[in-house]
Amino acid sequence: DGKSTLIGRLLLDSKALMLDQAAGLDGEEIDLASLTDGLEAERAQGITIDVAYRYFATPRTSFIIADSPGHEQYTRNMVTAASVSDVAVIVIDVARVEKGLLKPQTRRHAAVAALMGLNIIVAVNKMDLVGWSQERFDEVRTAFNDVAGILNIKNIAFVPVSAKRGENIVNRGGPDWYNGPTLIELLEDTPRKTSLAHAPLRLPVQLLLRDGDIRLYAGRIESGAVKPGDKVRVGPGAFAATVAQVRIGGVGVAYAEAGASVALELAEDRDLAQGGVIADNDVRYARRVVADLCWLDENAWTPARRYRLRQGALETQALIENVRFVRDVSNLDNVPAHELKLNDIASVQLAARDPILADLFAELPGTGAFVLFDPDTNQTAAAGMIREIVQ
């Protein structure tokens, strides 16, 4: 649909290219996709295969683009990209949309973005091929809004663009009837996800360290903040403890917040190993949850098959007890299913052998998510988002 060309135009017109890259783009027919599709197989087939990260900045904001493939067989690559993003730009070729019907893969993209809680910008591309028809643009907008209503997506913006000609990407152009923001202006104005510094404390313990007689628990703060003197719970037993010292890079600090890698000393001796969690006093644990899964394994799930569940630094055995439904991307209905196949998006009830953090993905995405992997092959089987706690 022109995604690689759109990203190439974004980089070119925002002056994000090196001089030698820009010099190679002289001429009337500029192959902007060559800036992003770096693999030989990508250039040969004219598609994106792997996720690549592109960096650029405007005077207002700096950006990282997770350039992910859009084809069905690479859905797991898109899940990887979406899991670290704030906003999804979904590109639709207006010339290939028939009577307002969106391709199944566009609906799949919308479903993945909805699962991850992303803001969405719909770039209606190749508008120059339909004479910048407002009617065709409105058809696409109506069709996507219908999909968004089913998926309960709230924050959507639409922009008509021509990536090849560079209209409404960075520089304004195109029709008189559109006086809204360009794509870059929409990106600059999209709110970032709420800072997790004021959320409940979650520090998965990745490593135990010794400094003489001092025992330190090291890891990255997924949410919240911590300082010496804080009362915390260490788990999964949820035992009470007091933070005696916070170190960053071996140096004691007065305060650390979400995103920082720290080492904590506790005032009390507690049985806390790798995979444990240091959390605030309201932390809860559960053995059964309802979760959304994106199935990423070429081997289908079958009942009674056990997997390893990894949540933060915690690892335990897990069993999918039942599949509540699978999302049919052709019409977005929830349909009964008895198996999970590659690229399926499903709601399941899952049981873990050991207690896991009872955090909902919508509230604490860092610890409300998990992965399942096959213990025999180490193949990642599914990415999961916790939606409900089963008492």
Image (cartoon, rainbow, N blue to C red):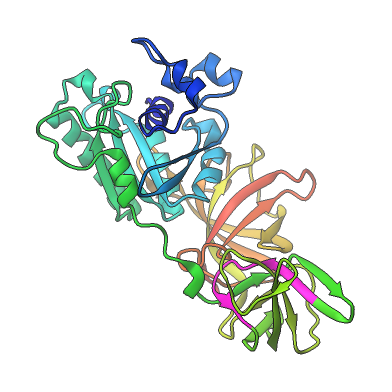
Q: Residue at x 70, y 55 (%)?
A: 304
In the shown orientation, is residue 328 left or right of residue 277? Answer: left
Give coordinates of residue 286: x percent, y percent: 62, 74
Locate residue 184: give its quadrant: top left
Locate residue 25: give its quadrant: top left
Give coordinates of residue 14: x percent, y percent: 37, 34
Q: Residue at x 45, y 66 (%)?
A: 195
Which residue is situated farthest in the right direction here? 212
Front-most of residues 42 and 109? 42
Locate residue 22: give its quadrant: top left
Stretch in magenta: 216-227
Res 297 seen here: yes
| Magenta highlight on residue 314 | no
Front-most of residues 383 and 367? 367
In the shown orientation, is residue 223 left or right of residue 311? Answer: left
Work out whether 350 lies above or below 99.
below
Give coordinates of residue 56: x percent, y percent: 45, 39
Task: Report the quarter where the N terminus lies.
Answer: top left
